[in-house]
Image (tube, rainbow, N blue to C red):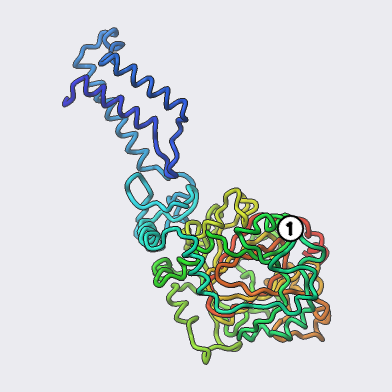
Amino acid sequence: ILFSKENIVSILMQRRSVNSDVVHLDGEEGPSNVRSRRYMQHRRRQRRKRGSGGFDFLERMGIDANAQVVLAGIVLLCLTAAVVLKMRLSGGSKGDGRDINRIGSNKERKEGKHNHYGRGEQYRIPEAMREFGDRSSRYAELREEYDALLPPDPQRSRQAVQSLIKRTYKQIDPSSMSYDIYNCPLTPPPGYPMQWKVTEVLNNWNPDDVTPHTDIYQGLCVFDFEVDFEKALNYREAELPFIVRNDPEVLRATERWNYPGYMKKLMDDDKHRTEYSKNNHFMYFVPPKANVGRKHHVNTPKDWKPPHKEFRMTYEEWLSHADTTDDNLGPDKPHWYHRLIGCGSMGKDCDHFSSEYLFDELTFLQPVEDKLYVIEPEEQKGIHCRFGMKGVIAENHFDATRNAIVLLGGERRYLLSHPNQCENLALYPKDHPSARHSAIDWSNPDLETFPQFDRATVNEVVMQAGDVLYLPTYWFHHIISLEINYQCNARSGVGEERYRLIEECGF
């Protein structure tokens, strides 16, 4: 026994002090509130006045001084072990990185490196969530390095993103519209958003043509995050699409993703799902083996073949295919589409090779309250990213959820249609492998086979670095990558306002 009774009493009192004021990972106080903390301070002052009287009750029980010291030592060891165990398990709740789907990189997953944030152990990302995110030491070190290089500075981030914008797109005949897309009214005007005949829009700019056409049929309002926030909320409440620009959180992430060398270090040598097509068209499909247990059974037609193939490759491998000269590009040349997913609360069915750092990178898409882009946090289905090669076309379709889409680099053209256009867009039926998607080749529409397409209406917008598109439930979108680009999105719940239109269309 190395301690006197008085020293052990002092240590025990200090240990109780540590336990009563535990600091959580998010920097907030532990379970004690101000009132209970003051109460504990009062108790400690009373003990100091009594001196070693903390063991008086043992003396009254007839336990001699030596036995008291031994007993106190045992208690001290138990308390110390409990505190050490608690520190080791701090962050051990849902999403802390213990679940194999939430550990940072594939490499650390394979090597069994389960490094967690703890007091004084490694850098903590200020905006990180407790529940979701990458808790690997590799990612913490990366962010520590770049957060020091790029500390929060909205003005610098805004200038950095502005430098990425190569051109300005103008409206075709804005005088024909009842509203100014850059100064929209507080609430949506009648007929918003304006749409034009799809054939007129496609004749002006064919989807196979990725050369810039700066005159476009844009009908969506563009809101400045700092100035038009209330307007954005009103249009969101009305379940109507719009664009947001100059969101400081988005600008900071966009600046970081375009900083030289960052993406290479972020992506490391992890292999992710990559789609390959022999041409520029990418049609979504449900593989036959994924058919089991689905709500709607998929009947695979006899002559049907998967429209593209899937591989696993690293970011640099994908970039080696995507970053090519225009001589090697064209509608009939091979194209590659790289995909990431941060699983969050999606569970075991999510991609095993998940990228949980997306919750730390794209804080504006985190599933928390009071976010403009995430309406029902509890219904969020992860964060999904798609890196597009120049020329890639994602065929027209609708999603049965709300969607917030951010572009973090490059340009993407979106052709959008109201859900009331469903009948005119000739969708594959719900029992087809490519259900919800248009059977029409928008680059070369066959109006004899699909005469209803001539009645369809659309509008368009070109998303640039730092833009966010709010896309309501069931809204149709046809996407063209105008250059190498980085797009991420998060879904959050279902708006039922236009379900009847889709139901009448056969879904």
Going 50% across and 57% down the picture, which residue do you hit?
A: 359
Q: Position of residue 167 (x, y in %)?
A: 58, 79
**Residue in the foreground of this view, choosing between 163 and 216:** 163
56 in relation to 257, above or below? above
Residue 108 appears in the figure: no
Residue 389 as seen in the image, left or right of residue 96? right
Position of residue 96 in the picture relative to residue 122 (left or right):
right
Q: Is residue 206 above or below residue 107?
A: below
Q: Classify mark 1: residues with Cα within 10 Å, few (<14), some (14-19) or many (20+).
A: some
Residue 458 placed where, x, y %? 75, 74
- At 30% from the left and 33% from the top, the residue drawn is 80
Examine the rendering and report whether any part of residue 402 can be seen: yes
Q: Quadrant of residue 203?
A: bottom right
Quadrant (top left, top right, bottom left, bottom right) of the C terminus: bottom right
The front one of 53 and 192 is 192
Say what secondary structure mark 1 lies in.
loop
- Whether residue 53 sits left or right of residue 290 in the image: it is left
Q: Amino acid at mark 1?
A: Leu
Residue 92, horizontal then vertical, whole percent: 43, 44
At x 35% / y 44%, what residue is drawn?
Answer: 119
Left or right of 332 in this view: 328? left
Residue located beneath label 1 in the image = 186
Picture quadrant of residue 16: top left
Q: Quadrant of the N terminus?
A: top left
